[in-house]
């Protein structure tokens, strides 16, 4: 395998086998509690989880977050997730497609459109690559490879600091993102990888032309920890441990950005682990809620495990709607039924 393929294989193994979760910095969802409705004027069976985002209809406001590609194991995972996304009408992203641009023979490990012709599908490249020879042509190639509806530009300065030979020149990227947003024929989304997007940075990104933001806050998988597990350099390993809990909690990012942009398509990811977390994120203003590690674990096990996970998320989200007296995610978002604990 190439160095990039080896890195992707390492990422999968480490996320599945090692403890790389945040410990002292949570996503923040535990600080909120729903107001219970003991007499909902609803029929549980009539609760409707369907929604829409970026012009696409979805069966539920759930996103299978960007994770992987580039290896045989990653291909199997992406295919299992794509089949499930098509079955349930979920949105889906893939991992960074840089390896597919540079090594076309592994492009099929990402290409899932034939298995999921109707889903909202996100291509994915690192924004920093715009400083390393990438431009409109490479971004268009990533979109075309996937037949994607939009392109995610992921922002990962901390990960690049810990990663051996990381790409750390972020100077002038906002100008290049602005140029790309003006030329790429599909929407561009900005997404962190688990350290959060502040309201100040969100403002700059929206002004640059991004169509949606995935806050991807702290509280879930720590990529500083993941990269520290990969490196054999003692200094880089310690650096990863020092910054293992660095970042802005998902809920803080979500609340701040939604207050500034009431109508911006907004995705909440980073540390969500169940449908109750999803319901809280929707009540705080999220249009979609993204899950990565739970889907990665399920897809690594079997298609049946992915199906079981989705059905559980549906049941948890539906129960939260029912027990707060709301028939749809939109109604939940509009209702003042979420309380922040002192």
Image (spheres, grey):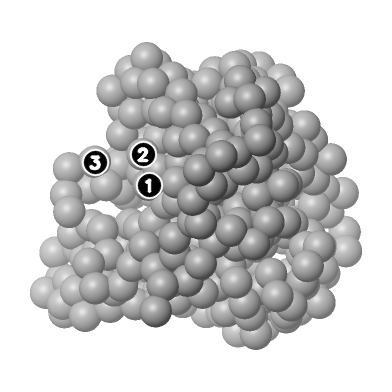
Check disc 3 and report its element: helix, strand or loop.
Answer: helix
Residue shown at the point (57%, 79%) measured from the top left: 198
User: Which mark identifies residue 273?
Assistant: 1
Residue identified by numbered label 3: 16
Q: Is residue 266 visible?
A: yes
Describe residue 201's horizontal placement relative to residue 334 as left or right.
Answer: left
Q: Where does residue 39 sit, x and y in percent of width and height? A: 56, 39
Residue that badge 2 annotates: 294
- State the image quarter where residue 221 is shown: bottom left
Check whether the beta carbons of the residues at disc 2 and disc 1 lie within 8 A of each other: yes
Residue at left offset 16%, top offset 77%: 238
Q: Earlier in the sequence, mark 3 or mark 2?
A: 3
Q: Residue at x 22, y 67 (%)?
A: 23
In the rendered image, residue 296, in percent from the top left (x then y), is placed at: 36, 36
Return the disc, 3 or 1, that comes first in the chain's sequence. 3
318 or 17, nearer to the observer = 318
Number of residues whose C-alpha sits closer than 10 Å to that of mark 2, classed few (under 14), some (14–19) or many (20 or more):
some
Residue 335 or residue 141, whichever sits in front: 335
Q: CA distance from mark 2 to mark 1?
A: 7 Å
């Amino acid at each position: 395998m190439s160095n990039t393929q080896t890195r992707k294989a390492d990422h999968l193994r480490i996320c599945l086998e090692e403890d790389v979760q945040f410990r002292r910095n949570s996503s923040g969802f535990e600080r909120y509690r729903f107001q219970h409705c003991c007499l909902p004027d609803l029929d549980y069976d009539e609760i409707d989880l369907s929604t829409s985002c970026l012009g696409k209809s979805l069966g539920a406001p759930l996103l299978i977050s960007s994770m992987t590609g580039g290896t045989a194991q990653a291909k199997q995972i992406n295919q299992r997730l794509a089949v499930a996304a098509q079955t349930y009408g979920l949105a889906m992203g893939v991992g960074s497609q840089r390896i597919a641009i540079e090594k076309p023979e592994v492009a099929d490990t990402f290409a899932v459109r034939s298995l999921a012709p109707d889903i909202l599908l996100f291509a994915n490249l690192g924004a920093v690559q715009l400083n390393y020879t990438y431009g409109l042509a490479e971004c268009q190639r990533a979109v075309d490879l996937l037949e994607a509806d939009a392109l995610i530009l992921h922002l990962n300065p901390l990960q690049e600091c810990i990663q051996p030979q990381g790409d750390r020149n972020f100077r002038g990227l906002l100008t290049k993102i602005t140029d790309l947003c003006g030329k790429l024929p599909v929407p561009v989304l900005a997404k962190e990888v688990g350290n959060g997007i502040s309201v100040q940075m969100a403002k700059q990104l929206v002004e640059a032309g991004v169509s949606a933001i995935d806050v991807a806050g702290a509280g879930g998988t720590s990529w500083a920890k993941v990269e520290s597990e990969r490196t054999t350099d003692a200094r880089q390993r310690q650096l990863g441990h020092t910054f293992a809990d660095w970042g802005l909690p998902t809920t803080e990012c979500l609340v701040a950005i939604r207050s500034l942009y009431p109508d911006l398509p907004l995705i909440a990811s980073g540390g969500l682990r169940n449908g109750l977390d999803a319901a809280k994120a929707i009540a705080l203003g999220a249009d979609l809620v993204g899950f990565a590690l739970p889907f990665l674990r399920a897809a690594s096990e079997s298609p049946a495990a992915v199906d079981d996970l989705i059905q559980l998320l549906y049941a948890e989200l539906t129960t939260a709607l029912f027990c707060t007296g709301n028939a749809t995610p939109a109604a939940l978002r509009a209702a003042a039924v979420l309380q922040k604990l002192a």
